[in-house]
Image: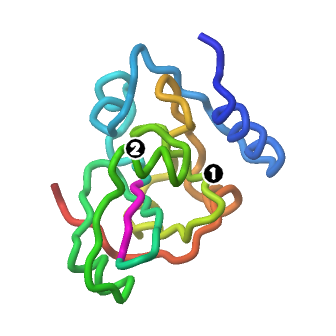
Amino acid sequence: MGLNEKLLKALSKLKEKGVKYRLLEFAGIARTSEDVARLYDVDPREIIKTLIVKADDSYFAVMLPGVYRIDNKKLLKELNARKCRFLNEHELKEQLFFEPGEVCPILIEKLPILVDRTVFETKKINFGSGDLYYGIEISTEDLEKVVKIDKIVDVAANI
């Protein structure tokens, strides 16, 4: 299967920044971290999801391991917001041109990116590539080279 335009752009950015990566090819479509864990033998704590949230009238990307969920109370406090919610499928396509499961943090340019501190608990991480059939794995220490992290936060809660 050929690589789509979003994935090629993400790989180009990795090469441009000199970041070593491994392309994970899935045997099927991976929309969720659970799909990735089922389709590829990696430590579930290394599977990072990037969720897009609307807090009051602003949009944010939040990265955290798939084994956690966002604690809304912590996130509201962190963002100094009254309410927050995840973008629906239509909004995700309209605002960021991503399908659910495609969100690639390397390709997010116009939104603040919050990274939960738990992301840094493993030596390597993998995340959405912009293509539902592939994931990108990098060393955790290289994350800041390819993703513009606005803030490291504590918003994770156990599932």
Instruction: Please give the name of the residue rendered at 45% of the width and 20% of the height, measured from the top-left corner.
Output: 26
Of labels 2 and 1, earlier in sequence is 2
Q: Nearer the viewer, residue 57 or 6?
A: 57
- SS label for mark 2: loop
Q: Is residue 69 left or right of residue 4?
A: left
Rendered-image quadrant of the N terminus? top right
The percent coordinates of residue 21 (x first, y second) are: 66, 38
Image quadrant assignment for residue 53? bottom left
Instruction: Tell me the kind of residue under disc 1.
Output: Ile
The percent coordinates of residue 48 (x first, y second) are: 42, 49
Q: Nearer the viewer, residue 22 or 6?
A: 6
The percent coordinates of residue 28 (x first, y second) are: 39, 16
Q: Which mark is residue 37?
A: none
Q: Which mark is residue 106?
A: 1
Instruction: Please give the name of the residue rendered at 24% of the width and 58% of the height, measured from the top-left corner.
Output: 69
Rendered-image quadrant of the C terminus? bottom left
The boundaries of the magenta stretch are: 51-55
Q: Disc 2 and disc 1: Cα gap in Å?
A: 15 Å
Query: Is residue 58 shown above or below 100?
Result: below
Q: Which residue is mark 2?
A: 47
Query: Is residue 81 shown above or below 41?
Result: below
